[in-house]
């Protein structure tokens, strides 16, 4: 058996920790040595990469997304609306999704994420109209093609308008079908081992689109197979009012009533909690995927990140879907988190280091991972390399701070599991121009219902 190659990432321009200013050594898919300034590797290396012009970060981790929504960016029927009216405008459009649309939109989202410094992406796909039953299988295939690490959540909607829910009946499934397919996907695709490239989680969409029974059954299935749970919660005041009317309780009380108050759970948004609810979430170790651009675009509010973190909740960052500034850019989402959270907590508490930690270590914790999200010996070699030679960085002092404050938007190189996935600002092995052209064609077809 051939020994894995050993690579020295030499003397990066800046890092999150000056303790490895001399770089790091990668053997196969793992980090095997960290080097202080002026230090050389203790073992022979096969290759040296000069990183002296690059800010080096752990690969960013996207904790919440909807890949398929890249087909409906800036969609005319959904402009200038808040969450419930935005959703009801787009549900009929999304109900027309077809397999190739999922394939191409997944490629687009993952390529955009890679180019923005993201090595691991969680996606929440919850639409399975007739003919689209294999949507998650399609996503797995595309993630493997591009070499991106993914946590694909089997979303679901069972509470249609006829049952008092928000989505139209054509977009919901029977609960026995949902549970059976959830188990199929876990058994077929979920990899619980260290360094896993594909993991599956269960993700009933939201309190306003699934029943209490489905939430409970999903929690039981997740416990049985030791997988994570994910849902939207406490995103808007409308959602709180819905929960009180439909279930007679606030969202966190509802979460506890269906067996979801545990460290197996991470929530998207998590905005409208009172102090007592924050304490309960923290005590249970529930993770929160903060989605700043989405929360601003839909005028949903501000996530109480530091309060949740102090209570014990891991905090990650997600780009969300079409609502998230209609983009899938992780490094710009990090900047948005800094700007939005400074309005709530001030400049001294919300630093560039803090938001970068949320987008790496924090997001990894939300996903239940301890093998990614950090540059340390034994961790996966998931790395993002950014150059600072674009015009917006001219005159910048601190390279690491400049990455966030001056508005980086594109990685020069990306490594996932020890393999180059982006070089010189281009996704390896992908014809991006042809992909964009096909995405435009499919988006136009979806818009007019062809």
Image (tube, rainbow, N blue to C red):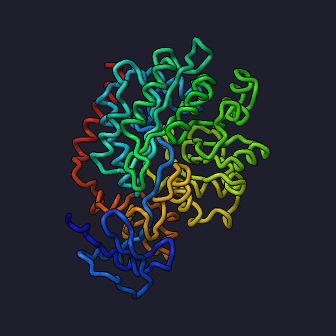
**Along the viewing direction, whichever of 369 and 385 lies nearer the viewer:** 369
Q: Is residue 244 visible?
A: yes
Residue visible at 47% across and 50% down?
62
Side (left or right) of 402 relative to 9: right
Above or below for 39 versus 91 = below
Q: Is residue 327 visible?
A: no
Residue extending farthest to the top is 162
Q: Quadrant of the C terminus?
A: top left
Residue 327 in the image, given as x and y percentages of width and height = 44, 44
**Along the viewing direction, whichever of 439 and 145 lies nearer the viewer:** 145
Residue extending farthest to the bottom is 38
Above or below for 406 versus 82 = below
Residue visible at 39% across and 77% down?
23
**Along the viewing direction, whichever of 130 and 285 lies nearer the viewer:** 285
Residue 278 in the image, given as x and y percentages of width and height = 73, 46
Residue visible at 57% across and 54% down?
337
Residue 10 in the image, given as x and y percentages of width and height = 34, 78
Side (left or right) of 28 relative to 73: left
Q: How many marks?
A: 0
Q: Quadrant of the N terminus?
A: bottom left
**Along the viewing direction, whichever of 416 and 300 lies nearer the viewer:** 416
Side (left or right) of 196 relative to 231: left
Residue 25 in the image, given as x and y percentages of width and height = 35, 74
Q: Quadrant of residue 298?
A: top right
Residue visible at 49% across and 19% down?
176
Above or below for 448 versus 201 = above
Above or below for 37 versus 258 = below
Q: Quadrant of residue 100?
A: top left
């Amino acid at each position: 058996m051939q020994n894995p190659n050993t690579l020295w990432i030499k003397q990066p321009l800046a890092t999150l920790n000056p303790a490895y200013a001399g770089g790091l050594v990668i053997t196969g898919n793992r980090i095997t040595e960290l080097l202080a300034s002026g230090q050389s590797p203790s073992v022979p290396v096969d290759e040296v990469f000069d990183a002296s012009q690059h800010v080096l970060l752990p690969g960013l981790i996207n904790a919440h997304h909807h890949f398929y929504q890249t087909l409906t960016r800036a969609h005319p029927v959904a402009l200038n609306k808040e969450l419930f009216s935005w959703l009801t405008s787009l549900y009929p459009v999304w109900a027309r999704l077809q397999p190739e649309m999922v394939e191409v939109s997944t490629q687009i989202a993952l390529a955009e994420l890679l180019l923005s410094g993201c090595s691991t992406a969680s996606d929440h796909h919850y639409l399975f109209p007739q003919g689209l039953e294999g949507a998650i299988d399609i996503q797995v295939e595309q993630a493997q093609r591009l070499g991106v690490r993914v946590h694909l959540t089997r979303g679901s909607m069972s509470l249609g308008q006829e049952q008092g829910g928000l989505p139209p009946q054509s977009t919901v499934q029977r609960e026995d079908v949902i549970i059976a397919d959830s188990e199929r996907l876990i058994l077929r695709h979920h990899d619980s081992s260290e360094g896993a490239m594909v993991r599956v989680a269960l993700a009933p969409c939201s309190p306003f689109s699934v029943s209490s029974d489905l939430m409970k059954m999903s929690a039981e299935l997740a416990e049985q197979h030791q997988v994570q749970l994910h849902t939207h919660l406490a995103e808007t005041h409308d959602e709180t009012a819905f929960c009180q009317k439909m279930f007679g309780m606030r969202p966190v009380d509802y979460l506890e009533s269906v067996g979801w108050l545990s460290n197996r759970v991470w929530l998207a948004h998590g905005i409208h909690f009172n102090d007592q609810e924050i304490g309960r979430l923290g005590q249970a170790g529930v993770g929160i995927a903060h989605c700043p651009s989405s929360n601003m675009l839909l005028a949903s509010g501000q996530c109480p990140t530091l309060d949740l973190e102090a209570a014990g909740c891991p905090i990650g960052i997600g780009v969300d879907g079409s609502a998230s500034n209609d983009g899938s850019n992780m490094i710009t989402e990090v900047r948005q988190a800094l700007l939005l959270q400074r309005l709530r907590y001030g400049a001294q508490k919300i630093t560039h280091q803090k938001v970068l930690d949320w987008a790496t270590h924090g997001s990894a914790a939300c996903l239940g991972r301890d093998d990614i999200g950090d540059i340390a010996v034994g961790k996966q070699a998931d790395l993002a390399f950014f150059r600072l030679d674009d015009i917006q960085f001219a005159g910048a002092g601190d390279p690491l701070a400049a990455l966030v404050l001056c508005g980086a938007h594109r990685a020069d190189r990306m490594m996932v599991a020890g393999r180059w996935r982006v070089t010189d600002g281009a996704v390896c092995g992908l014809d991006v121009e042809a992909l964009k052209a096909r995405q435009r064609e499919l988006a136009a077809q979806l818009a007019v219902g062809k």
